[in-house]
Amino acid sequence: MKKFLFFFILFVCHTYDSRSQDTAPVTANRFSITGKVPSLPDGIVIGLYQSDGQLLIPMTLDTVADGKFAFSDTVSCTKSLMLISSDEGFPSQWLDVWVAPGKQITVTGEDRLLPLWRAESDIAEQHEQNLFQDASRELNRKHLIYNAAECGWLRKMQLEHAGDKEFARLAWAKVDSLRQYSFPLMRAVYKKELDYMATSPIGKVFMTKLLTYAQMSSSKEFMPYSDELKALYARLPDSVKHTPEAELAYQYLYPAATVGVGDEMVDGELYDVQGGSHHLSQFKGRYILFDFWSSGCGPCIESLPELEEIAELYRDTLAIVSISIDPQKSWKAFVEKRQMKGNQWNELRKAGTGLAMSYGVKGYPHYVLIAPDGKIQSIWGGYGKGSLLKKLKEEINIGIN
């Protein structure tokens, strides 16, 4: 379970400057969010985030004072944003808040279970979102209590005991114990929402949920409800089935056959940061290591120095192809910021489709080793310091120049 930190955000120290409680008036091109949670002590930091389709991107932060926080910004269309806090006692999940030009949104809550806070406005999508929230509220409360406890141990491990292997073992043991309760509750929450969707109106939130859960359905640990999801897809009118969201959900629910060890490798067209086109087959005749990764994946980032070391050690016999699943803008920015070397490629598709689907990628990092004859020699996932060097030494029975 340790490799599947699904929907977990990275816990970071609050080193940002907090915003003022004063927000600009709500004009035609702005939104305003005002929050009131009287039980929160002064100093709690609330973050406003947006999604780029794969990663959560921070927009701004505000520090709670007298139980209040506020955000205001420009907006050109109706869209969903997320409220998150990484402070002690908060779960890893967020509250979806819909914003639109000229709209005032109020957020209220009773405790630190932030996903159960209530966002109210006259935005139709917020009303739809709240109906989903109501469908699973009591079950979700039980789940979030365990989730917040998990986050507490992970936060201590990452911030207060960084590098302490003994504490890390203790923390993971606690987290695994908590997940014996939280994971079944999480799946029960999903089932409640799916049952609600069987008769609910088909709106923007419905389609977002369907697509999200369809993508999750490749992991039975998280989403063991493929039949229910297929039935929901069948509910869609033909006009909706031809939308990009529905077509992508179909790909997740009815995936193409995956390849495995001994099969011929699947090729595809990938792009470098300059926009140049490449194919995996250009390295046939050498060993090829595919590294499926994301900049939002902690172990992926930890593996970068070791991948560079391997590229040098095996430079005459092995080609490493790093295949990012991030959207183009965030991928290019990360590669350039980190000055990443080698074959930094991207299919520029939605995460979990294309080559990731062909090679059965369900978590990150995910590795595929191709033999010189073009056949798949080994597939594995996850990273720990030294694990790649050890694995390749076992798999590639040749001397290192």
Image: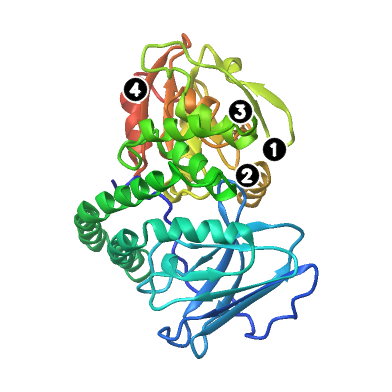
Q: Mark 4 or mark 3, which has the lower sequence index? A: 3
> Horizontal and vertical percent for residue 390?
32, 33
The residue closer to the viewer here, 120 or 31, is: 120
Q: Is residue 113 above or below residue 79?
A: below
Q: Mark 2 or mark 1, which has the lower sequence index? A: 1
Amino acid type assigned to the residue bearing label 4 in the image:
Glu
Q: Quadrant of the C terminus?
A: top left
Q: Which residue is mark 2?
A: 331
Mark 2: which secondary structure?
helix
Residue 200 visible in the displayed image: yes
Q: Mark 2 or mark 4, which has the lower sequence index? A: 2
Do the CB atoms of the residues marked 3 and 1 lie less than 8 Å apart?
Answer: no
Do the CB atoms of the residues marked 2 and 1 lie less than 8 Å apart?
Answer: yes
Q: Which residue is mark 1?
A: 273
> Horizontal and vertical percent for residue 85?
47, 70
Q: Is residue 94 above or below residue 234?
A: below
Mark 2 or mark 1, whichever is nearer to me:
2
Mark 4 or mark 3, whichever is nearer to me:
3
Give the numbered dot on residue 64: none
Amino acid type assigned to the residue bearing label 3 in the image:
Asp
Q: Which residue is mark 4?
A: 395
Mark 1: which secondary structure?
loop
The residue closer to the viewer here, 365 or 75, is: 75
Mark 4 or mark 1, whichever is nearer to me:
1
Mark 3: which secondary structure?
helix
> Horizontal and vertical percent for residue 54?
56, 46
Amino acid type assigned to the residue bearing label 1 in the image:
Val
The residue at the point 45 percent across, 43 percent down is 199
Q: Mark 4 or mark 1, which has the lower sequence index? A: 1
The residue at the point 46 percent across, 11 percent down is 264
What distance separates the C-alpha of mark 2 from that of mark 1? 8 Å
